[in-house]
Amino acid sequence: MGLFKFAQSRSLWMMHFCTGCGAVEMPPTMTSRFDMERFGIAPMATPRQADILLITGYLTVKTLKRVIRSYEQMPDPKYVIGFGSCTLNGGMYWDSYNTIKRLDLYLPVDIYINGCMPRPEAIIEAFVKLREMIAKGEANGWKKYKENIKWYKENQAKVFDVKKWSVIKWE
């Protein structure tokens, strides 16, 4: 493990994109009882300062546009954590025409936290796992996104109904 990767894994700034009921579990994770900052993970207000994009709750097509924009504004290296069963399979909104079922079709997800809603212990465990992955050089979703940008943009265009747009540029 290189010194750079070790240091990088010990200071992670997180932007949580709260889209639903998942936001309820974040305050206990941040405050004194569970204290995620003891693991070197601190909340940030803007994507330009964040390393981790934590997406909590269900995603609609309209919200997915904002999530992708936030992700693309983050500096490299960047990591995505899908929080709760909504980011895995749509959760309790699985049969809605407007709900995104699998986040990893549109953004590279480094870790999913399953459950509805995952408890603070599960969130902390995911952060620790992500730290280990970063230290080992295994958390490379951001590289995957760059290498497969055309595939991701095509999936995004399908869900956004880009046929109405005159020009699509992603290269």
Image (cartoon, helix red, strand yellow):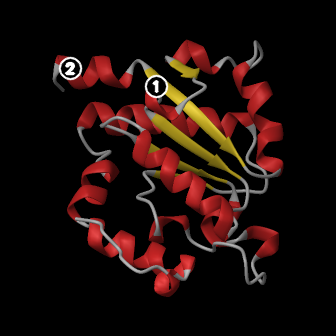
Whole-number angstrom distance, CA of label 1 to CA of label 2: 19 Å
- In terms of secondary structure, where does tag 1 sit? helix
For label 2, the crowd category at 10 Å Cα-Cα, with few meaning under 14, some 14 to 19 and many 20 or more, is few
- In terms of secondary structure, where does tag 2 sit? helix
Is residue 28 depicted above or below 112 in this figure? Answer: above
On-image quarter of the N terminus: top left
Residue 26 horizontal/vertical position (percent): 74, 33
Location of residue 5 (image quadrant): top left
Q: Which residue is drawn at 44% across and 60% down?
A: 107
Q: Residue at x 75, y 78 (%)?
A: 94
Q: Residue at x 25, y 67 (%)?
A: 148
Location of residue 166 (image quadrant): bottom left
145 or 166: nearer the viewer = 166
Q: Is 163 positioned to the left or the right of 119 in the image?
A: left
Location of residue 99 (image quadrant): bottom right
Q: Give the residue pinned by disc 1.
A: 49
Kind of residue indicated by mark 2:
Phe
Kind of residue indicated by mark 1:
Gln
Is residue 29 depicted above or below 161 in this figure? Answer: above
Is residue 8 depicted above or below 62 in this figure? Answer: above
User: Residue most toward the bottom?
Assistant: 163
* Disc 1 to disc 2: CB gap under 8 Å: no
Q: Is 31 positioned to the left or the right of 108 in the image?
A: right
For label 1, the crowd category at 10 Å Cα-Cα, with few meaning under 14, some 14 to 19 and many 20 or more, is some
98 or 53: nearer the viewer = 98
Q: Give the residue pinned by disc 2.
A: 4
Q: Is 84 positioned to the left or the right of 81 in the image?
A: right
